Image: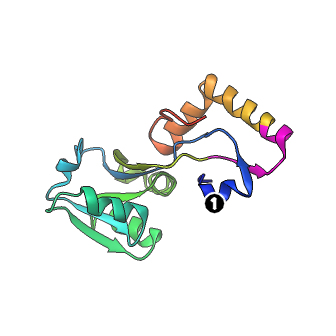
Amino acid sequence: MGKNPEREKVIDFTVAYAPFFQAVFGPKALTIKSFDDLAGKSIAVTRGTIQDDVLQKVAPPTLKIQRFEDDATTVAAFISQQTQLLATGAAVAAAAVQKNPQVQAEYKLLLKDSPNFIGVRKGETALLTKVNEILRAAKADGTLEQYSQKWLGRGTGVLPD
């Protein structure tokens, strides 16, 4: 889950274990290295999401942003090639890519990082300590990195401790 001050009032958080992020995804054949490379392209995004807000700030004026009402419709527009690109969360993109390998989509540009944490009941110090030990070991031995590459298409990067 995402960590924020409101949630921290009622639960404790482990160290971060995954790089949940909002990003632009597209076919491997399409070269996108910067936001300027989005010029003249089309992108599907779910209306009112973090991705939509960030895109409005960083998109070149000629990027055609097509907004849809939910993730399923947004992904469907990209998969059916109504748009060239997709702006969504890593988990949504990973599921779409796994179900539709013919699209050969991959991570292109980061919109926003929002690492994942595990929440435990306040005061459960022993549990929090044990889960942190497990997560730190998985980070140290490369397990978290492997899972991130496999399921999210991007490494863990620097996760908060």
The quarter holding residue 17 reads top right
The amino acid type found where label 1 is placed reads: Glu
Q: Position of residue 83 (x, y in %)?
A: 27, 64
Residue wearing tag 1? 6
The quarter holding residue 28 reads top left
Which residue is drawn at the image coordinates 76% and 37% (left, top)?
Answer: 131
Which residue is drawn at the image coordinates 78% and 40% (left, top)?
Answer: 128
Q: What span is colored magenta in the figure? A: 117-128
Q: Position of residue 5 (x, y in %)?
A: 61, 55
Q: Position of residue 97 (x, y in %)?
A: 44, 52
Is 79 or 66 nearer to us in this picture? Answer: 66
Q: Is residue 144 magenta?
A: no
Is 112 or 25 nearer to us in this picture? Answer: 112
Q: Is residue 64 above or below residue 161?
A: below
Q: Secondary structure at mark 1?
A: helix
Q: Is residue 118 magenta?
A: yes
Q: Is residue 64 above or below residue 128?
A: below
Extreme residue in the bottom direction = 69
Q: Is residue 48 visible?
A: yes
